[in-house]
Image (cartoon, rainbow, N blue to C red):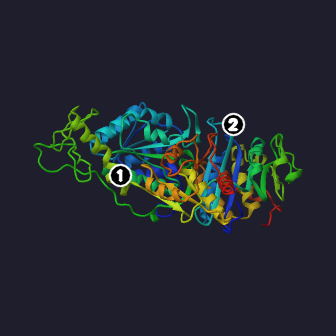
Amino acid sequence: MGASADRGMMEIRLSGSGGQGLVLGGRILARALLLDGLCVAQSQSYEPTSRGGLCRADVVAAESTPDHPLVGELDLLVLLDPIAAAASLELLRDEALVLADSSLADGFSDGELADVYLPGVELADVDLADIKVHSLPLYQTAKRLGAPRVANIVALGALTTLAGRWSQEAMEAAVLEEAPRRSSDLNLQAVRLGLALPEGQRVAR
Amino acid sequence: MASDSSSGERQNLQGNVACALGAIAAGCRFYAGYPITPSSEIAEQMAARLPKVDGVFVQMEDEIASIGAILGASVGGVKSMTATSGPGFSLMQEGLGYASQAEIPCVIIDVMRGGPSTGMPTRPSQGDVMQARWGSHGDRPVIALAPASVGEVFEQMLRAFNLSETLRTPVVVLIDEAIAHLSETIDLSSSMPTPLASRKVATGDVAGFLPYAATDDGVPAMQCPGDGYRSHMTGLTHGEDGFPTQDPATVERVMRQLLGKLDRNMEQIECFETLECDDVDVLVVAYGITARAARRAVVSARERGLRAGLLRPITLWPFPERRFRELASSANTVLIPEMNAGQLCVELERLCPHPGPVVRLNRIDGECISPRQILEQIEKLHAHD
């Protein structure tokens, strides 16, 4: 519905399947943006099952309270499971950025969205103008830490670097504040590995 | 779970958490309930927070017991509430009617999810608007509030308790799942300070005390067990002395008093917001999360030169009839987006000064109505002018 003049305005979605820590991820991201001085609205959608099923966490950020708190045109999209792609691609704005996991079976490849293989997705209805897909080994990185469950935190680190729209310090602080205390060291390692993951891929916006 | 450890600063707070914080700020010190998605965080928060302010939390065996417990606590002099969702709200309807008839202050939160029956527990809906109005039997005064943001949930909880106490009537707060589970950045310390109201307490002679005697504002003063007044409380239609009666003249008098107390205090009950309503072709009426989408759509429509405006009832029942009639009489069309198969629209059709112009936009698939959907409808309606 038209680009906003609000410089802080952005719409972000973390999506995948239930159990991947997406709702916690959304809360951490919202906290990081708050620490960076923005106003946020964070929502989520999940199914009644605790594992599996489509799951997403959305964050809308702006310099003042967003009038409409739900996403409509995504600037940033994270895909931790290929099943989540179909439901979100039609919401992508021109010049949107997609971060996808390359290390899952049936995973995503890197490049322009038009050239990327996305299982189960019919691209005919999607406007592909300048949408960039960054495929990074998020789960593989988490497994190196011995904890696949922190793939969500790795993803937040990578997204922070790729987007370049909020500070690394805020993200690290938000991870420590919102994630379980007993796993602070693990989560800090995960977010730092994530921050370093896109090396050389940072996109100027 | 969002914390309130940083009170006095900006924080990201979930709607359900704001609901619990608002209740405690309003002076609520008793909660009885049976957890149900998507309202469970309210119970969770009250269980954690009430003991710290010398309050009491009880998890009940079901929703019928829950409303019974809060009515008992309220009669005992404590501000009381419960929270539930559609299925539990249905079970509470009998108790709600009792609260109206016996004039017992209490606050009931209904976090609306997809229905009917168990429906879609995690998906948003606005399907209980008419249950809130007509769910209990008989004619009774009904107040229902419908906040549209996390900050407004907090503010409306203060209003809910104030209205309930000053008018001695149950107040329902209808929150859709989208607002209940939304986290927004708010600063509670910057919200307008709202003076807290408490029920009018009986004074004067113990001898000859009439617990339901009319007062200036139509609301009887309330006694508290143990304060010396003898009284009787019943769901049967009762006279001013509190005892059952079927004397037609008495019944007519006390029922008119019961139903009339909202009309006599409408100034404090009515609450709505208007946006761009000076010269309106298409008047959008929306509440809850849908009003947030409508706000965006109206702003976009104005940018396109379309004369759209928004009426957002915050007090949903009683509906702001007078203001609606004024706005609708100058508009060509009234557009009413709702996340149900069409509920409040029936009221608008009834109130509309000229026939035919109420257009419904409904969504019943568990998804929220988007600003784009509303804007497209506004554009279509303009094209037809």
Quick one: label 1, few (<14), some, or many (20+) residues within 10 Å? many
- Judging by the rendered image, the residue that carries numbered circle 2 is A52
Please tell me which residue is depicted at 18% across the width and 42% down the height of the picture.
B226
Please tell me which residue is depicted at 61% across the width and 36% down the height of the picture.
A48
- Secondary structure category for the residue under label 2: loop
Question: Mark 1–mark 2 contact, CB under 8 Å?
Answer: no
Q: Is residue B371 above or below residue B98?
A: below
- Judging by the rendered image, the residue that carries numbered circle 1 is B163
Query: Where residue B17 sits: x, y (%)?
Result: 49, 50
Residue kind at label 2, given as amino acid type: Gly
Residue A68 visible at all: yes
Please tell me which residue is depicted at 55% across the width and 40% down the height of the picture.
B113
Query: Where residue B303 sits: x, y (%)?
Result: 66, 66
Q: Marks 1 and 2: which is nearer the front?
A: 1
Residue kind at label 1, given as amino acid type: Leu
Query: Where residue B237 sits: x, y (%)?
Result: 26, 34
Circle 2 chain: A
1 and 2 marks on the same chain: no
Quick one: label 2, few (<14), some, or many (20+) residues within 10 Å? some
Circle 1 chain: B
> In the rendered view of the protein, which quadrant contains the C terminus of chain B?
bottom right
Extreme residue in the front direction? B354
Query: Residues under labels 1 and 2: Cα distance?
Result: 44 Å
State the mark number for residue A94: none
Q: Is residue B96 above or below residue B178?
A: above
Residue B83 visible at all: no
In front of the other: B249 or A120:
B249
Q: Is residue B5 above or below residue B127?
A: below
Q: In the rendered view, does A154 fall on the left or right side of B321?
A: right
Q: In the rendered view, does B7 fall on the left or right side of A134?
A: left
In front of the other: A22 or A4:
A4
- Secondary structure category for the residue under label 1: helix
